[in-house]
Image: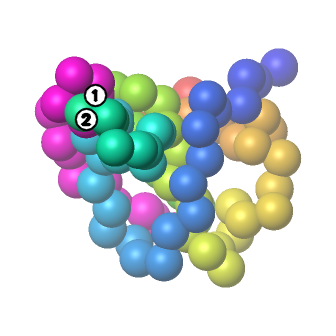
Amino acid sequence: MNTPPPEVTLVEAHRVWCDGSTDIRSGARYRPAALGHPKVFLEIDEHGYVDCGYCDRRFILRGGPAEGVDQASLADISEGGDPGHA
């Protein structure tokens, strides 16, 4: 049994980036530099999603094959990963 990702973000583009802190919290006192990881760029392929290798945030292409699917049923595919070997 797979574990669902800790966070899922729906996106409009195939190319996305993640720094581990964007969109987690907001407010006047929020300081994103205290959180996160190095900024990485990720590419969503034909599976319709990609996982960040640092924080496991999943990016799902809106209207793609992974939207509306039980996320725990999908393999963890970080950039460069192969779901056939997960």
Image coords of residue 60 (percent x, y): 57, 60
- SS at mark 1? loop
Q: Quadrant of the N terminus?
A: top right
Residue marked by disc 1: 36
Image coords of residue 61 (percent x, y): 55, 69
Q: Specify few, some or many for label 1: CA neighbours under 10 Å numbering under 14, 14-19, or 20 or more.
A: some
Q: Which residues are magenta?
A: 32-46
Residue marked by disc 2: 32
Q: Residue at x 25, y 35 (%)?
A: 32
Q: Nearer the viewer, residue 57 or 65?
A: 57
Q: Nearer the viewer, residue 35 or 71?
A: 35
Image coords of residue 80 (percent x, y): 32, 44
Q: Residue at x 33, y 62 (%)?
A: 16
Q: Nearer the viewer, residue 19 or 46?
A: 19
Mark 2–mark 1 distance (CA, rounded to whole Å): 7 Å
Q: Height in image: 1 above or below 29?
A: above
- Would residue 5 be found to the left or right of residue 68 on screen? left
Does residue 26 appear in this view?
Answer: yes
Q: Quadrant of the C terminus?
A: top right
Dot 1 amino acid type: Gly
Q: Height in image: 60 above or below 6?
A: below
**Residue 30 in magenta?**
no
